[in-house]
Amino acid sequence: MIFGDIETIASIVFILLLTLFIFLKRKQMQTQKLLFPLLYFSIYRTKLGLRFMDSFAGRFRRLLIFAGYFGIILGFLGMMLISYFLVNSLVPLFTDPDAKASITPVLPFKARGIFFVPFFYWIISIFVIALVHEMAHGIIARAYDLKVKSSGFAFLGVLLPVVPAAFVEPDEKKMRKRPWKEQVSIFAAGPFSNFIFGFLFIALAYFFLSPVAGGIMEPDGIKVTGYVDPGKELPAEKAGLEGQTITVVDNNEVKTIDDLAEKLGSKRPGQVATIKTDKDTYRVNLAKNPGNESKAYIGAYLEQSSKVKESVKANYGESLPRAIVWIAGNPYASEYISGSGLIGFLILLNFGVGLFNLVPIGPLDGGRMLQAVLLRFFEKKRANKIFGGVGLFFLSVVIVHIVFAFIKPA
């Protein structure tokens, strides 16, 4: 297939549709031309969700105001946590070759410096997280009887629009005149809601989805995903095992990686192991393990393979169980990306987006929270000077992390 798998095709179609949408709505778009057309940010205002915000805020006003105050406390604790984490991990980037950058872009394609999320997981997660985050800002604003002028969509473009987002737009002039606690409560609501939903998804995964997925799937062998030190002709490479699933070693069935380790652990370097895969049977001369030369070694990267249980397949077919595992995650997957499922990414990205938004940088929620507090306790000129210095410092820290994510070897 020319364009790769369905995830790649879907991401290309999505970007093209976004481009077409922006072109058709260009007269209604407001675009900030950062380095246009290389880098730009476009917003499209609507009235979507405003009635819901009014209704929800009116029904639960007291509870929401109380939750908003709790969100202030959690927000500043989160700000201190992410600030300490970013600064503390800064020096190792320059001194430790193995240190990893703490901030990387989250995108649906694989590249150095990118945290890869498969496209369908990515787009659903972004939609849910943005909806929760922005609705929370609007609902708390309405709980304080502050007008929300509009809601809408935003798009970050790098030549083509690649990252969709959402926003709500409270009346900024009136908000600046409100008590600082109300302002901070509104700003903190977005990250606070992401944390709440992160914990809700954890509970859903732990108490329901993971047990269900565990009852649906079972291990059925070990897939060879690649070779260690290609070209050195270690046993797996000599036999040509890449892409095959090992199911039997010396007439003993192996279903899990632990089974395979146990069977190979009983062998010695130089001995022959008869390995049966889903494709063929091979006689493999075992090598010395680099970590312990007394142990046998095949020199392969392995991944746990799994399948829908036959009893489940007989009752429900294979499509429904696979769909459940796609959401819940595969309990037998060896790698996070392949095993987390939609729920895993919703957990990770809710916490990640919530914390990142608390970094004390101007446009982010954390920056606006800090500015509101500084204006409460300092004269305006001094408050803005402190805020500008703090924001510039943390913007520099974030940029350093992102740059190192792209330039340091994976």
Image (cartoon, grey):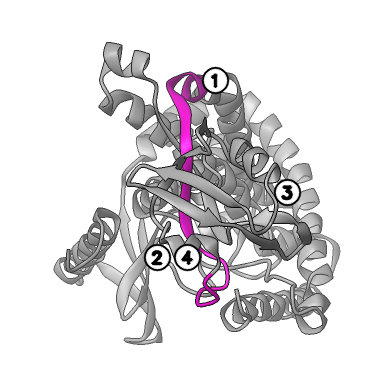
The spot of residue 262 in percent (x, y) is: 67, 38
User: Which three-letter amino acid code belongs to the residue tagged 2?
Assistant: Phe
Look at the numbered disc 1 and give the secondary structure of its residue.
Answer: helix
Please report whichever mark, 2 or 1, sits nearer to the chain's N-terminal start.
2
For the point 40% across and 54% down, the residue is 118
Q: Does the magenta stretch include residue 227?
A: yes
Q: What segment carries the magenta color?
A: 212-233
Please state which of the two labelled residues, at mark 2 or mark 1, is closer to the viewer.
Answer: 1
Residue 379 visible in the snapshot: no
Q: Mark 4 points at which residue?
A: 237
Please report whichever mark, 4 or 3, sits nearer to the chain's N-terminal start.
3
| Quadrant in the picture for the N terminus | bottom left
Q: Mark 3 points at which residue?
A: 75
Please report whichever mark, 3 or 2, sits nearer to the chain's N-terminal start.
3
Q: Are marks 4 and 1 in contact (CB under 8 Å)?
A: no
Please state which of the two labelled residues, at mark 4 or mark 1, is closer to the viewer.
Answer: 4
Q: How crowded is mark 2: few (under 14 residues within 10 Å), some or many (20 or more)?
A: some
Q: How far apart are marks 3 and 2 (CA)?
A: 31 Å
Residue 229 higher or lower than 247, as above or below = below
Residue 38 located left or right of residue 226: left
Q: Distance between the residues labelled 2 and 1?
A: 30 Å
Q: Distance between the residues labelled 4 and 1?
A: 37 Å
